[in-house]
Each structure stands twice: as structure tokens, then as C-alpha cells.
Image (spheres, rainbow, N blue to C red):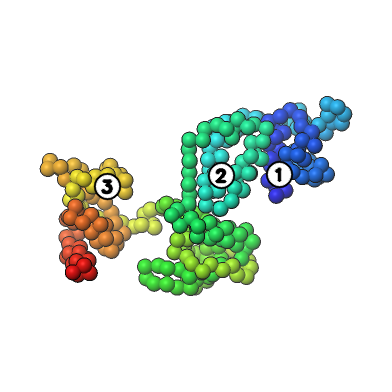
Amino acid sequence: MKLDRMIGILSILLQQEKVTAPYLAEKFEVSRRTINRDIEALCMAGIPLVTEQGVNGGVSIMEGYKIERTLLSTSDMQAILAGLRSLDSVCGTNRYAQLMEKLSAGASNLLAGDTHILIDLSSWYKDTLSPKIELLHSAIISGRRVSFCYHAPKGESRRTIEPYDLLFQWAGWYVWGWCVKREDFRLFKLGRMTELQMGEEFEKRSSPPLPELSPERIFPNAYQVKARIQPEYKWRLVEEYGPDSFIEQPDGTLLFSFGFVDKTSIVGWIASFGGGAELLEPSEFRKDVLEFAEGIRRNYL
């Protein structure tokens, strides 16, 4: 893309005193004429480039106007690379790695630096996630509606949205957009979406709001849970809720305390421990845990 190429050219000029047009043409796999047009476009954008003819000629940024080369340190560039690689993990291509190569052209040591931070933003259903992200991203860029079947706890429904943003939050991917059915902005989890189809163009709304993603709003603590957990499940409490979520008792058991959104999540979570957890509060839900366990027992009689 022209914009990516121009960013790459500017990055090279920030890192090298002078380069030739043939070098840039070979680097970005385009014609010399295309490079000349890019240089003209950069000049029109206010970047003072100087072109010198002859044996020692080339393209450079006018002396005194160079942006500080330490604007991005090696560690900064490595952090950017880690982020771009993480996007490649879900988009199904290597487009972001290629963009990073352009940004770091002429400074190969940046790409060969610290590669010990590995981020994979995909999931167990990566094969179905990547096409969804590509379709939704394309719809956001082109301003087109998207329709899909949405599978929620309250049942399935057919939805049509005007998509505005893709988000990775709470270990999952979401799309934020205007829901035609609800006539309001809604957040939809990509893992619950099937049969995605891109539809007609829509006129984007002026100043669309950003999603309010505070845990207090999305996951309000309707119930404060207290439970006695057996010590062999300490690892689960640390992993899921942190080491401050429980107090170790003299007998070795763990007194767990945390806020939950609804009764269903409380009952299911306690039951997932089998006999390794006892719900203490809310006490009125103890019978629901018993009924849940009885239902499972009946299925295996």
C-alpha cells in the first residue's frame, strides 16, 4: 500500500544519511518512477527532502529538519514488533510483520533483537476467528453493515450492526457497533457469532461513543460470595481471582471471598470443584448447588 511504503521510506531516511532511488525501488519492490512519486508526495506533506544527482547523490532529509533518531529506541521498536506479531496471530496473514520490516528498514538489529516476548491473540478456534476478524475489519474500513446469528445465554437471534471497533478484552475478541434491532450501541463477542455476512453501506454516525469497559459496568458484583475451598485447589483461586481472593485457615482450607455477577455463575463455579468447595454465602443459593449436583447425578444413574 502507498501509505505503508511512504512510512517505510521516511523511516529509512530517518535512519540513514542518504539513500538512492534505485535502492528504495528494490527495497519496496516497485518502480523507480513510483519511488519518485512517493518522494514528491512526502515533500507535499511537508517533509523537506533533498535530491542530489551524481555519483554520490541520493535522497536525504534536509539538514536541520531531521526528526530525532532516538524518538523510538531499540526497546520501543521491539515492543512495537511484539504487538504487530500478536495481530498476525489472529489475522491469518503476515501483513503486520511486513509493515514492521518497512518501519525498521535499514536497522535490521531491531528485528533481530529480543524475541522472547511472544503474544498470541488467537484462541482454540483460531481457524474460525481469523475470517471473522478480517470480514469485520474490512466492514469497519469500508463502512458496511454486517449481519450474523448471535448465540447468547437467552437464546439465538439474528442481528445486523454498523461496526465501528474491534476489541480484545477479557481474553476474548469483541466488535462494538450500532445494533439495528436494539437501536443502540452494543458489544458482541466474536466467539458467539456465526453466519457472518457483509451488507450494504451505511453512513457513519458523528462522534460515536467508545464502549465503557470498566469491570464495574460490564461485570457488576451483584452477589458477594464466600466459600470454603480445599487446599488442592489453591492454584485455581490464584489463577482465576488472584492471591488476595482468599485467606488460608488454620485447618489448611481456603476462605474465598469475591463478587459475582449472577446466581448461575456462582452455582456453576462452585459445582466445578466437585466436592472440593462449599458455598457459605449467599446461603440461599446452597439449595441451588444441591439441585445442580442432583441433576448431574440423575444423568449418570
Instruction: Say which amino acid is labelled 1.
Output: Arg
| Any part of residue 240 in sight | yes
- Which residue lies most toward the top here? 56
- Which residue lies most toward the right here? 54
- SS class of the residue under badge 1? helix
Give the spatial CA distance, label 3 vs label 1.
Answer: 49 Å
Q: Where is residue 263 in the image (x, y as percent from the top left)?
A: 26, 63
Q: Which residue is drawn at 36% across and 54% down?
A: 216
How many residues crowd mark 1 within 10 Å: few (<14), some (14–19), many (20+)? Answer: many
230 vs 73: above or below:
below
Q: Mark 1 points at which residue?
A: 5
Q: Which residue is drawn at 61% across and 48% down?
A: 95
Instruction: Say which amino acid is labelled 3.
Output: Leu
Q: Which quadrant of the structure image shows residue 224?
A: bottom left
Q: Which of 183 and 57 is in front in this view?
A: 57
- SS class of the residue under badge 2? helix
Q: Position of residue 109 (x, y in %)?
A: 60, 30
Q: Earlier in the sequence, mark 2 or mark 3?
A: 2
Q: Earlier in the sequence, mark 1 or mark 2?
A: 1
Q: Earlier in the sequence, mark 3 or mark 1?
A: 1
- SS class of the residue under badge 3? helix
Q: Name the residue under label 3.
A: 237
Q: Name the residue under label 2.
A: 84
Give the spatial CA distance, label 1 vs label 2.
Answer: 17 Å
> Would residue 88 be found to the left or right of residue 237 on screen?
right
> Would residue 33 be found to the left or right of residue 139 on screen?
right
> Would residue 293 be found to the left or right of residue 5 on screen?
left
Q: Which residue is drawn at 19% across and 66% down?
A: 297
